[in-house]
Amino acid sequence: MTAPEPRPTLSFLHVVFPHMPYQYLPSGKLFRTQVSKYLSPLDSLKDRRSDQETRVFLYKRYLLQASLVDRMVGDFVARLRELDLYDRSIVILTADHGGRMAAIGYLDDINFVPLLIKRSHQGSGKEQGSETEQARGEIDRQPVSTLDLLPSLLDLLGSEPPASRDHRQRSFFSPGYQPPSQLYQNKKRVPFDLDLHTSKLDLVTWKLEQFGNGDDPRSLYRAGGPRPDLLDLHLQDLNITDEPRLSVALDLGGPTISYDPASNFAPALISGNLNLNGYDAPCCELALSVNGTVEATMSTRPGGSDSLRFRCTIPESTLRPGPNDIRV
């Protein structure tokens, strides 16, 4: 987007985010160049809900990339304002399809398509209707169909929709608009459960409990760890004794990991092997320190005949340019 056109235009931007593989940070950097099989749920778990830490970890990767989308939308709006286009533009944010986060074990966790609409001159006093209501914006929780997006846009522009063989298409803003009563599932039309909104509220509560409301950016990275009481402690404040049989091998090498802020990669996902070497005591919950401060805790899971696997995320902000000391 460079400069305003002399005539009204329609700009369409399709961005493939958020989308698998979920390996992007809010900054837009990759945290893993390849998706390891160890990032997936345990194959032995038929019911993934029994592995709470894995559920949190998988959904965390999605939220990190969704945070990148938030940033992209912010950059887009800032650019519109810079070009003096924002107030007079109709801005619509939606998606091509929804999905289901079955990876965290909830079969009813359907991701509905987001739909955000900003009218032209909304909040400037130039729009029709109540200035106060338009400036504040409204939330309408009734389901709508993206098939009705075009007639709704034309309605905002004061234009008649083109003739269509599908007479069910109507503007969201028309009186008596009826939400869809069916949806497609496995290429078949099935009744749409309007009560699904209610069942999703329990899942929203779970997400807020696990990841917070966004006030603390670090809470997203730290979610799911078994020992939150150790976070932010310094190594010198911990009573650490050596077990000579246990050793750690980080996938990225180490214990020194390098970080280049100018690179498109940030080592914010730390994973590796805990080699047991015959150690047979109950094992193990782990704490990970970055440059002397505990930034994450994690549980282990089966890895090999004499080893366990671990993985966690750390905030990119905890990494300093150059070498970083990573300890488990």
Image (tube, rainbow, N blue to C red):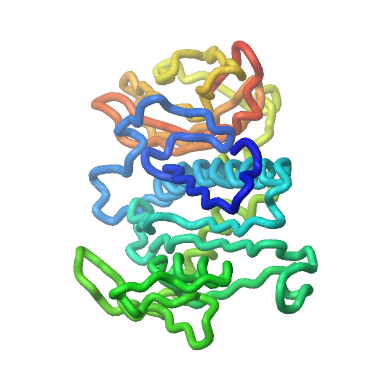
**Coordinates of residue 57 in the picture (x, y in percent):** 45, 44
Does residue 54 appear left or right of residue 318 in this picture?
Answer: left
Q: Residue, x 36% and y 61% (percent of image)?
A: 106
Q: Is residue 2 left or right of residue 24?
A: right
Task: Tell me what residue is drawn at x 29 percent, y 43 percent.
Answer: 42
Check the image and report above or below for 279 versus 81: above
Q: Nearer the viewer, residue 200 or 128?
A: 128
- Residue 280, image quadrant: top left
Q: Where residue 236 appears, x then y in whole percent?
A: 69, 22
Residue drawn at the location 40% of the way across and 35% of the way down:
300
Q: Position of residue 312 (x, y in %)?
A: 48, 34
Circle count: 0
The residue at the far bottom in this view is 176
Q: Nearer the viewer, residue 133 or 280?
A: 133
Q: Would you identify the image quadrant in which residue 27 lies? A: top right
**Above or below, comparing residue 48 to residue 204 in the picture:** above
Residue 205 in percent (x, y) is at 54, 65
Q: Is residue 57 visible?
A: no
